[in-house]
Structures are given as structure tokens and as C-alpha cells.
Image (tube, helix red, strand yellow):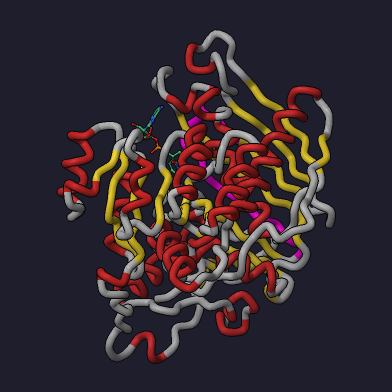
Amino acid sequence: MNAGNSPLFSLPAVRCLTRRRFVQLAGTAATGLLMTKPLRGFTADEYRVDLPPLQEEQTEGEEPKPSPGDPPAERIGFAVVGLGHLALEQVLPAFNACKHSRPVALVSGHAEKARRVAAQHGIPANQIYDYASFDRIRDNPAIQAIYIALPNSLHAEYTVRGAQAGKHILCEKPMAVSVPECQQMIDACRQAGVKLMIGYRSQYEPLDRLIVRAVREKKLGTLREFVSANSIHQGDPKQWRLNKRLAGGGPLPDVGIYSINAARFMSGEEPSAVFGHTVQWADDPRFKEVETSAQFVLQFPSGFTATCSCSYASHRSQFLRLNGSEGWAEMDPAFAYKGLHLRMSHLKDGHPAIVEPGVESRNQFALELDHFAQCVGSGADPHTPGEEGLQDMRIIEAIYDSARIGKTVQVETPAAAIRGPDLKVES
Ligand code: NAD
């Protein structure tokens, strides 16, 4: 089979494929060839895992060097607000892979922890704030932006206070715990003349973006359905994620939001109606306030549908499958920080062929931080602005409403743009 004849192979494929990665991928392909059983009626050769073609300059000569990025003094300075798991394990380490962003201050309620973390990341001890002194960031010109990594119900308060202090805001998902709060955040940032972006890291991931490109180029034909699950276990009944006031809900706004956002982002469509269902285990102390799991269908005006589920009481499962009339794209895992796995299928000579595009996953947090830093520096609008978070919150509220009344609920699609301009991702 000549991989070069396949329509999927004209995708951006191997921009920066190293020899080591080539050997890894070749190994994967060989394994695929050996392990993939032929479908009934197809020979093994017709149904095989294959690779995009390698171009000569990518296999020979020196490997391309990534651009070194801005000198530290020219990078956009971020204050990281909240030093929990996400901030310590993902966001702060991601600055090491950034080219336009650097951490310059911390905001935490734990002085000793903040001092230790500051020392680890080269942040001076006098650049630490607590939640009471937070508003003093207004007087600190080194802080141009803040990264909010607090429990969901605190996102609105710190966005508004941050905007009033004149700082640009990069806020974690879910944007807030209600539609009015999301709107309040958008209004506060607009009024203060600062940028607001929501941390939808998957939209900055090269593999997700490859799917979007395949959809736009009609490589999958007409989109028919999206199927996805994002489920994990939550143990400690005392944690904020199981407290309705702090979290806004259970797995739906926390992990189900990834499936909602991927269905919207990949299809480029907005759902016009949703049908939702929730399960809440009455006798489990973890689920006194929030749902154990949620199942929902999003209906899009074109006839495309997204059927999704999320849970706080299931073995980790994080996949998506986007089905079109002439192909599919599948990621499993789809929502992890790393180790994402993408496969695509299309018809070749009337038979299904499966490809594993040789595009490398990247540090999504670094890409997201640098995109926002570039927006702050250039004045451009972020790709995932507050309106993107507001739209997901509208859908989440509609799913809860539907689950409560047992009927399909219509979702309003605003006339104004929901998503900012397309991205240019640097190597
Ligand atoms: P976490 O519980 O590990 O950290 C929360 C931090 O907020 C802690 O440092 C805690 O001390 C602080 N805090 C301040 N006030 C608090 C209060 N009243 N109650 C509880 N904690 C308080 O949570 P996390 O996993 O780091 O999540 C933080 C945010 O990041 C959430 O909005 C979550 O949805 C989001 N998140 C995003 C991703 C992603 O992949 N984008 C992954 C995980 C979490």
C-alpha cells in the first residue's frame, strides 16, 4: 500500500520527526501490522496501521532546532493563584517549556508552602501574596497576567479582582459555577480593558488540532456522531470537588466538560438542544451533594450528535471517537496530560484503512500559556476567550435542567463569536 496516495496522508504529519521518534513510530506500525486482525472480507494488507510518508530532509541532516524564545526580561510575567495539584504538578513546571511566559509571583494561603515553591521556581520571596493581600498585585508591574488554579467557585471572584487590579486573566476550566458568574467575569475584564482566556488546554494540543484540520478538509466526510467518556475515581469525601458550593457540580463540570468542549471544537458547530441524565448514589458519603455520573446527548443543527458520559466512580476512561460518513478519528486517551493516542480511519479503494498520524503531542500547558502571553504582548484576542467558557456553562446548566425535568432542553447559541482566531503554534 502506498501511504502517499491516501488522502489522510496529506495532513501536516511529521513536522519535526526525529530519528528516535521515527524508530518508535515504525515499531508501532510494525506492531499494528502484526496485531491488527483483518476485518471479515478484507485481507491483512487492506486493513493495516500505516505511517505518513517521511520527507528526505526530515530523515537526514541535523534535526531542526526549536527557537530559543524570548529573553526572560521580555517574557510576560504570570502570578499563579492557588498552589494545588494543578499549579504544582502541571502549570509551574510547564513554564520551563515556555518561550514567552515566566512565573514571577505566587498567591497562596499557605505561607510556608509558597516560600518553598517560590524558591524551587526562582521566584523572589517578596513576590508572594496571600488571598487577603491579593489586590496589592495592582502595584506590581512585574505581574502582567494571573493564572487562576483555584476551586471552581472562586474563579469569578479572583477574575474580577484580578481584572480590577489591571491584570490579564488566564482562568482554569470550568470557567465558573453558573452562567451569570461567567458573564460577570467577561464584563469585568472588558470594563478593565484586560484579556480573559479559559484554560482549554486540549484546544492547544497538536493531535486535537490535527483532527480539526481533518474535519475542515472533509477528510472524514460529513460528521455524523461523536462518542466520548471522561471518567475517574474521586476518593476523599471531604474534598472541594464533592462540595456543590465550591465545585458547582460533580463530574459534569469537572471532567464531562472535556467531552462537551471537544465535540464543539472538533465539529465547529454549537448544539441547539441537549438531553441529560444523572445518577447520584444516595448511600455513598461522597455523593451527598453532587452527581456520581452524568450521561448526555448534544444535538447539533446539522444532525450531528455527541453522546457522552462522565463519572466520579469509574475506572479511568478518557476517550473520544468522531465518526464521519467517510472516516473516523479516535483518541484514547484523549484528555490526559500526555501519552495521547490518535488513530484515524478512512476508505482506501473502498476498504477501511487505519493511520496513526506521526504528529507529536506537546506540553499543552506551555502552549496555552505562551498563546496567552502572545495575546497579551500583541493585543490579539485569545483563541479560547471567556465566551468559550460561558458557552460550555450554558450547556452544562441545560444538561442539569434536562436531567431534572426528564425532557430535551434547547440551548441558546449567541450571535457573537464564541471562539477567538485560529492558532499559529510555533515549533
Ligand atoms: P486542588 O484542590 O489540588 O488545589 C486547589 C488550591 O486552591 C489549593 O492550593 C487550595 O489550598 C486552594 N484553595 C484556596 N481557597 C480554597 C478553598 N476555599 N477551598 C479549597 N481550596 C482552596 O485543585 P486542582 O486540581 O489544582 O484544581 C484547581 C482548578 O484547576 C480547578 O478549577 C480545576 O477544575 C482545574 N483543573 C484543571 C485541569 C486541567 O487539565 N486543565 C486539571 C486539574 C484541575
Which portion, as a residue range, is magenta?
A: 310-325
Query: What is the x, y in percent for residue 267?
Result: 70, 59
Q: Is residue 378 left or right of residue 58?
A: right
Q: How many marks?
A: 0
Q: Quadrant of the image for the N terminus? A: bottom right
Ligand 1, seen in the image, is in the quarter at: top left
Is residue 247 shown to the viewer in this render?
Answer: yes
Magenta segment: does it hold 125? no
In the image shown, does 404 or 223 lie closer to the viewer? 404
The residue furthest front is 139
Please say whether residue 311 is one of the residues in the magenta stretch. yes
Residue located 61% across and 46% down the image: 259
Give how far across and how far down residue 154 sits, in percent: 48, 34
**From what the image shows, is residue 29 above or below residue 79?**
below
Check the image and report above or below for 38 versus 81: below
User: Taking the image as drawn, is residue 40 in sight?
Assistant: no
Q: Residue at x 69, y 34 (%)?
A: 397
**Looking at the image, is 200 positioned above or below residue 205?**
above
